[in-house]
């Protein structure tokens, strides 16, 4: 039975999380609505205390109503002049900044993201994403050129409703870098955040009315991926799908996109190599290696495979252990915490499963290798695999588990670095500019950092090769993805 938004249940009451009222329903066509079913989210900071919020659990009817609303919203938002769209995006950026504390505190409660990082960096970077795309869409000019007997113009048309599906790690910032280009391009969005960390998406959606989005331009649907997520990507009225998550889900979404011939981008998992050559600044390299435990290793870009030149093996390990010994596991609200709890007991158990299988397969657990009693922390773990084919080398673990291997020369280092099916990011640590250039070019990855990590200008392309993804986000790349390019050719005798 077809359901209009008017037929959906009323929105459930907001949840009070970290002192902030958070909407728990769906935002569809400018109205907060609910579902008959619900799902809970617990806080990794105190899992056993029970749910911190109970949210509407969207279903096929919710998805249908959201796409109806987006189609209606497209008629208005897609026709809004770029300069006016940019103004709305800038107002949203200002509102995000004005709500920094609330967004940071709710994200920390919902998925244990480091509170100081949220306040100092990630909320601001979220706002910067909207400002960047406001600038780009205004700068953007139609390209025109004459040819024999013809005037040509290339027009970037908004593509239509865009579904944006995001994962539970770094949920706020990561969502903004996908939502901003879609909206700037003139596409109405339907955002489906991850069910393990759905709350800051609700805060963001709540700001959109004040920012000035017309009804239906910005929609939020809460629920389970296999339920409402699958229904959204199957709807043939959706004209773009922008997905970040695991390769397995990426394949499901790719099949749905193929059925409707809809372009999609997929930002998927990673298994980044961190190459440390003997000529590197070892203090800096070791510091960064230990930093890969940040956010409990729940970072797609993390350099989880430490590949170290054999001649510095002992020195590297000695310094690495000394640094990791100094890391404090604790509450992400405390400034002196280095490693926060993991997002969910199920995920912590998955991570432990990798370690247990590695142990059984004959890999050496060099340090860590166990859950921490009484919290969702997992010990920072280092594994020396028995071979490069080991599961812990070849599969994404997405937890505080690094592997340690050595190489004898540059060729072997590159071969090992390129030996997995992934190709999202890589790091090279060396004191030689020539080597940096050579190795950087030889690595099979979408992003390569030399003597640094994680920094990226928002205009730079972002994405992976192999099973790490399809397509590129960032800067113009995302704007082009969200647009349909049309060439207009008009007879013009004066150009003959
Ligand atoms: P996931 O694939 O389980 O879920 C991601 C999102 O997809 C969630 O919102 C989920 O509800 C939804 N989903 C699940 N099944 C679906 C379906 N059949 N149809 C539609 N939607 C569906 O991933 P996760 O566990 O939330 O996130 C961790 C993964 O994300 C890791 O592999 C990590 O490397 C990856 N990741 C990649 C990047 C990147 O930029 N490349 C960034 C962050 C995370």
Image (cartoon, helix red, strand yellow):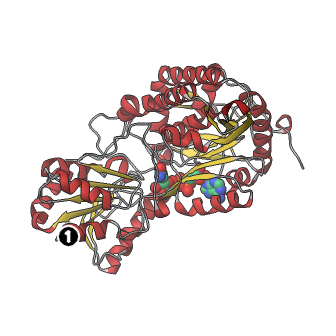
Q: Quadrant of the C terminus?
A: top right
Residue 463, image x and y in percent?
A: 47, 51
Residue 68, image x and y in percent?
A: 80, 40
What residue appears at the point 63 percent right and 60 percent down from the top-left corner? 254
Q: Is residue 244 above or below residue 358?
A: above
What residue appears at the point 59 percent right and 45 percent down from the top-left corner? 481
Q: Is residue 214 left or right of residue 253?
A: right
Between 466 and 108, the residue placed more toward the observer is: 466
Residue at disc 1, secondary structure: strand
Residue 130, image x and y in percent?
A: 53, 29
Q: Quadrant of residue 361?
A: bottom left
Q: Is mark 1 within 8 Å of ligand 1?
A: no
Residue 36 visible, this angle: no
Residue 31, image x and y in percent?
A: 75, 29
Q: Is residue 476 above or below residue 379?
A: above
Task: Single out the residue that lies furthest toward the right.
Answer: 1
What residue appears at the point 23 percent right and 54 percent down from the top-left corner? 436
Between 444 and 152, the residue placed more toward the observer is: 152
Residue 479 visible, this angle: yes
Count neighbours of disc 1 (C-alpha within 10 A) and say few if under 14, some if 14 to 19, many if 20 or more.
Answer: many
Q: Quadrant of ligand 1?
A: bottom right
Report the residue marked by disc 1.
407
Between 386 and 137, the residue placed more toward the observer is: 137
Q: Is residue 388 above or below residue 205?
A: below
What residue appears at the point 30 percent right and 52 percent down from the top-left corner? 292
Q: Quadrant of residue 358?
A: bottom left
| Mark count | 1
Task: Single out the residue that lies furthest toward the front.
Answer: 496
């Amino acid at each position: 039975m077809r359901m209009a938004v008017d037929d959906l249940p009323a929105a459930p009451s907001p949840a009070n999380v970290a002192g902030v009222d958070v909407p728990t329903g769906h935002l569809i066509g400018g109205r907060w609505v609910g579902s008959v079913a619900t799902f809970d989210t617990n806080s990794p900071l105190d899992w056993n205390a029970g749910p911190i919020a109970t949210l509407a659990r969207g279903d096929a009817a919710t998805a249908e109503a959201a796409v109806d609303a987006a189609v209606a919203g497209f008629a208005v938002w897609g026709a809004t002049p770029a300069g006016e769209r940019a103004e709305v995006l800038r107002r949203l950026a200002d509102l995000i900044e004005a709500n920094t504390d609330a967004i940071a505190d709710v994200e920390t409660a919902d998925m244990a993201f480091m509170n100081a990082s949220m306040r100092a960096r990630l909320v601001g970077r979220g706002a910067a994403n909207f400002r960047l795309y406001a600038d780009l869409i205004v700068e953007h000019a139609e390209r025109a050129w004459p040819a024999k007997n013809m005037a040509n113009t290339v027009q970037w048309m908004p593509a239509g409703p865009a579904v944006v599906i995001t994962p539970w790690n770094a949920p706020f910032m990561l969502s903004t870098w996908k939502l901003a280009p879609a909206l700037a391009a003139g596409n109405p969005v339907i955002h489906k955040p991850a069910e393990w960390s759905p709350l800051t998406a609700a805060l963001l959606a709540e700001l959109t009315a004040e920012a000035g989005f017309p009804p239906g331009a910005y929609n939020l649907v809460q629920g389970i991926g296999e339920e409402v997520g699958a229904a959204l990507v199957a709807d043939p009225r959706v004209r773009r799908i922008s997905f970040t998550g695991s390769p397995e889900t990426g394949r499901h979404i790719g099949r749905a996109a193929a059925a409707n011939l809809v372009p999609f981008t997929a930002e998927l998992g990673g298994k980044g190599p961190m190459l440390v050559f003997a000529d590197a600044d070892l203090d800096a390299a070791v510091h960064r290696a230990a930093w890969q435990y940040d956010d409990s290793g729940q970072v797609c870009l993390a350099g989880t495979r430490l590949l170290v030149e054999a001649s510095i093996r002992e020195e590297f390990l000695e310094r690495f252990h000394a640094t990791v010994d100094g890391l404090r596991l604790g509450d992400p609200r405390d400034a002196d915490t280095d490693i926060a709890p993991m997002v969910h007991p199920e995920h912590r158990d998955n991570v432990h499963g990798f370690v247990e299988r590695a142990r059984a397969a004959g890999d050496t657990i060099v340090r860590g290798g166990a859950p921490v009693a009484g919290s969702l922390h997992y010990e920072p773990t280092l594994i020396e695999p028995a071979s490069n084919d080991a599961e812990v080398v070849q599969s994404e673990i997405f937890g505080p588990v690094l592997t340690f291997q050595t190489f004898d020369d540059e060729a072997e280092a590159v071969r090992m670095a390129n030996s997995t099916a992934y190709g999202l990011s890589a790091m090279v640590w060396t004191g030689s500019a020539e080597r940096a250039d050579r190795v950087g070019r030889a690595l099979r990855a979408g992003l390569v950092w030399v003597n640094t990590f994680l920094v990226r200008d928002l205009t730079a392309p972002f994405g992976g090769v192999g099973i790490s993804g399809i397509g590129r986000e960032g800067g113009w790349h995302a704007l082009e993805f969200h647009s349909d390019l049309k060439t207009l050719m008009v007879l013009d005798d004066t150009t003959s």
